[in-house]
Amino acid sequence: MTAAIVGAEVTRAETPYLPLTAGEIADEAARCRDAGAAVIHLHVRNPDGSPSQSSDLFSSAIEAIRQKTDVIVQTSTGGAVGMSIDERAGPLACRPEMATLNCGTLNFGDDVFINTRPQIRDLARRIREAGSMPELECYEVGHIDEALSLVEEGAVLPPLHFQFVLGVRGGIGAREEIIRFMASQIPAGSTWGVAGIGRHQKPMTEAALRLGGHARVGLEDNIYFAKGVLAEGSAPLVTRVAAFARSVGREVVRPDRARVILGLSNARI
Ligand code: KMH
Ligand code: ZN
């Protein structure tokens, strides 16, 4: 289970439960860990709440998380729409265990989230040099093919971990048959998870768990617990999806076990 607890687009005006400071982020990471999350997908914010990829801010947040819990920290290299690649690469200075690698350009709501092929390769190299494991973010079927090209070129090395992000306005839709198809396109032995945007979060993560994948929830993707009811942080969303996982016979694993499942190099058991 991954918890995406901050994001780059959600604001405090939309939900008062969004963590912004290093202390708030660490508290929420620990709450999510207690609820069943093994991975924290991390963005950080400036003091005014705007998105940042500053290595100093990431370093403070990661340090605060480390004081409280043993989660796998996966930093964003997507940042916010419009950031330069140099800016987006900021958190790699912290040598995170994992980092996202966005595998293509797409319409992102009314914006365009640009990831040109040279930019993807540039970030892949920087992620490798940081000693981080990339999570391959696929918002479209073609992004899987791009990820496979990266593997063929040696820009990304196995073991491979994919995140299928469904339901972005402008990206692939949030339907179970799409999960089945995307999961059928990745090499045997890869791991995969699903993130669903907005109201798609619950049905899509539940479908992923039924189909043998992993799940990402959190305020970055969805701020509601139910129609019109805000989630009081990401932890309640983790609690709910963890209960669903157990109800369909899936084990909810701690970070050390997740490190083994993902093939992270510092796996201890
Ligand atoms: N904020 C989105 C434009 C990532 O973290 O790598 C990109 C994003 C993906 O959140
Ligand atoms: Zn993100």
Image (spheres, helix red, strand yellow):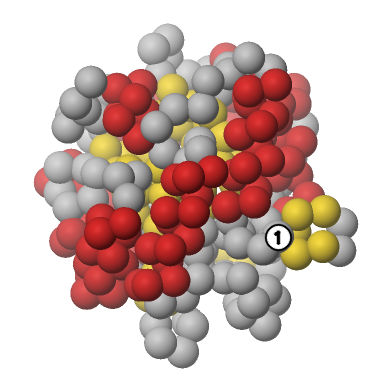
| Residue at (75% x, 64% y) in the render | 230
Is residue 196 positioned above or below 190 on the image?
Answer: below
Give the image location of residue 30, x and y in percent. Answer: 42, 54
In which quadrant of the rendered view does residue 223 lie? Answer: bottom right
Is residue 202 positioned above or below 175 on the image?
Answer: below
Q: Work out whether residue 253 can be spotted.
A: yes
| Residue at (51% x, 38% y) in the render | 36
Give the image location of residue 148, x and y in percent. Answer: 39, 26
Give the image location of residue 67, x and y in percent. Answer: 25, 59
| Residue at (25% x, 56% y) in the render | 66
Q: Secondary structure at mark 1?
A: loop
> Callout 1: 10 Å neighbours few (<14), some, many (20+)?
many
Name of the residue lying farthest toward the bottom:
48
Instruction: Point out the image quarter for the C terminus.
Output: top left
Determine whether, in the image, residue 72 is placed left or right of residue 212.
Answer: left
| Residue at (58% x, 18% y) in the render | 250
Find out if the beta carbon at label 1 lies less than 8 Å from the nearest ligand 2 atom. Answer: no
Type of residue at label 1?
A: Ala
Q: Please give the residue where the numbered disc 1 appears in the rendered image.
A: 231
In which quadrant of the rendered view does residue 210 lie? Answer: top right
In which quadrant of the rendered view does residue 160 lie? Answer: top left
**Front in this rendered view, residue 14 or 108:** 14
Give the image location of residue 172, x and y in percent. Answer: 68, 41
